[in-house]
Amino acid sequence: MIDLLKKYPAYSWVLLLILGSCSGESIDPGEEIYKFEKPAHFPEPTYTFENNPVTKEGFELGRRLFFDPILSRDKSVSCNNCHQQSRAFADMPLHGMSIGVDNQAGFRNAPMLANLAFMREFFWDGGVSHLDFVPINAIESDVEMDESLANVVSKLNQDDRYPGLFKEAFGVDEVTSPYLLYALSQFTLLMVSANSRYDQYILGKGELSTEELEGMQLFDQKCATCHSGELFTDFSYKNNGLSSSFKDIGRGAITEDEADYGKFRVPSLRNAEITAPYMHNARFSTLEEVLNHYEQGIKGSPTLDPIFMEDGKVKGIALTEDEKIKIISFIKTLTDRDLISDPKFQNHD
Amino acid sequence: MKILKLMAMISLTTLLWSCGSDDEVNPDEFGTFQLYFENKVGANSITLRAPGSTDYDYETSDGEPFNLSSLGYYVSKITLEGPNGEYFQDEISVNADEAKGYYLLKESNSISRNILLEKVPAGTYDRITFTIGVEEDGMKEGAAGGVLDPAAGAWFWNWNAGYIGLMMEGTAEHSGQAYVDHGNGVEVLEKTFGFHVGGWKDVTDNENFVNNIKTITLEFGTTVTVNPHLSPLAHLITDVLKVLDGAEVDFSTTYSIHSPKGGKVLADQLLNAFSVHHVHQSTSSHD
């Protein structure tokens, strides 16, 4: 080696560089943004990071896949079609029920993707219990991407770029479905929404207005039974009285129990301001409509949540117009401007 | 000739030595153990037919003619136990690269029905335990490779994410199934039946879920010895007629099972479907 360096002194700096980068003492500040960090006031994440730690290469591969319509049958639909950053990765209001290949209409409202690392179950019916398995539903749904997972893997293996990118991210010579799912999970895992004005307030770093604080108190009294904790959901499935009969049985399709017909996930309310329309069937287009529903629109059915029943009769949540305005002011403090403007979630390919 | 004699002597010595050493097992010694799963319908061997075929090879105890076009199941969490506290647990490892300890046994692939257990501690064994299906601890690891890779032939449900523990498909003379065209070349033929038994969720605060994962323990009825020179074989029988008859399947009303609750009647019979045909000391595998 010394002889070689004597012979080619100009290359000695290369060696220094290599040694320097191997020492591991210097941390590239660029890598920090790819680290998953649990916000101090959040619960422990549920994701299996020990199997799939987030890395720059894995995240960037996931991002490329997220924006690539190669995942769909006719290369017309990408994840991003229905999960847009400006909407906290929910669909745009125009598409209450998202649009899949051949312009087919979906049958449920595409939810936001923020804070998936902390969820125990996924989708409106909670049928999937691990984040890795989530994209399979969208890929294989007839009305979404209408493609088989096996065919996606085959297309990626035949692509000019992907095999090399999977090699960089995971050290594998062949694209396989678990690594495809790992990459997509890495991209979505970093969509942590914990820097809203509410969070700043909770962490003692910012103020809320009097109206917002009054709204928070009202929210705690009237909404937080279900929309509880820092994720603003108790992770349960409830029938909130949207209708008295069910075209979509929701949770009932997973548990196969009539007692669960018409029940759907209690969604997180983080970023609710920018994720209209609301409910699994996109019934309401404004937060005002949602609160009006809880006040006076609840429909009775055998599975209606008991919280909306009193003495055998349907009973809404008592809300004055003033209270509604304050609660909505508070809900708007849950909007995370950082999440929707963070350049690392934008298409770079 | 001399060589043959020498070989015979060596073999005999090995045999005597291994038989004599039962009571003083070297804890550092390991061997292999072979499992062979043979699927049967009652006393009959299985011939797979094309879906819709009217060659009915078997009958249920109610005299309902049927045949099989696909049959298989996941076996996992294999353990062996012996009378002197011998214990072997097949290694489990689920991640993107592998699904070690999980086996997808298909009637159509005899190789898949031969399992070679490695690094089995030397000793005597008289009992085997295994699980049919993929339990919660396999699911919670997330995306998996090997026989659990949904893009590489794993039997996976995406909508209620989990694996199909037992799959049985075929045609029955009196099946109530009508022809269904699902488009994209996917069709269900008349008189076929499809039983996909899955469901692993066992949530304490929700009694609704049906967990169809079953753990089976079978006694060999004798002991077999594992050591570096002896690799015993257990020939197991999976009698699917026990499942169909035990569940009193009437194909005219029961022909399409594709959810945990629907599969419960079949899963509940799995404990009766497995038996030990025989075990023997061996050095080569069955086909």
Image: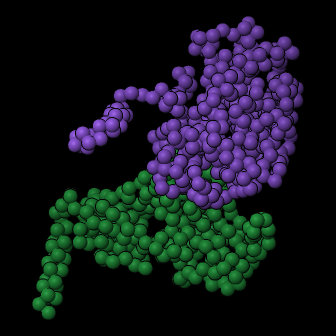
- Residue A28 visible? The answer is yes
Q: Is residue A186 left or right of residue A262?
A: left
Q: Which chain is purple?
A: A
Q: Is residue B193 left or right of residue B227?
A: right
Q: Nearer the viewer, residue B258 or A327?
A: A327
- The C terminus of chain B sits in image quarter: bottom left
Q: Nearer the viewer, residue A318 or B166?
A: B166
Q: Is residue B149 left or right of residue B64?
A: left
Task: Give the image location of residue A259, x and y in percent.
Answer: 74, 44
Query: Which residue is at 48% across, 26% downward?
Result: A29
Q: Quadrant of the N terminus of chain B?
A: bottom left
Position above or below: A159 against B274: above
Q: Nearer the viewer, residue A157 or B150?
A: A157
Asked whether B112 or B61 is in front, the reply is B112
Determine the image quadrant of residue B125. bottom left
- List the single residue furthest toward the bottom: B1
* Residue B175 in sight in this render: no
Q: Position of residue B40 (x, y in %)?
A: 53, 78
> Which image quarter: residue A293?
top right
Which residue reaches farthest top? A210
Q: Position of residue B70 (x, y in %)?
A: 61, 73
Residue in the image at 21% along x and 58% along y? B28
**Which residue lies at the image location 45% right of the left edge and 40% below the top edge?**
A50
Position of A100 relative to A88 (above/below):
below
Examine the image and state in which quarter residue B267 appears: bottom right
Instruction: Give the x, y percent position of residue B79.
Output: 38, 60
The shade of chain B is: green
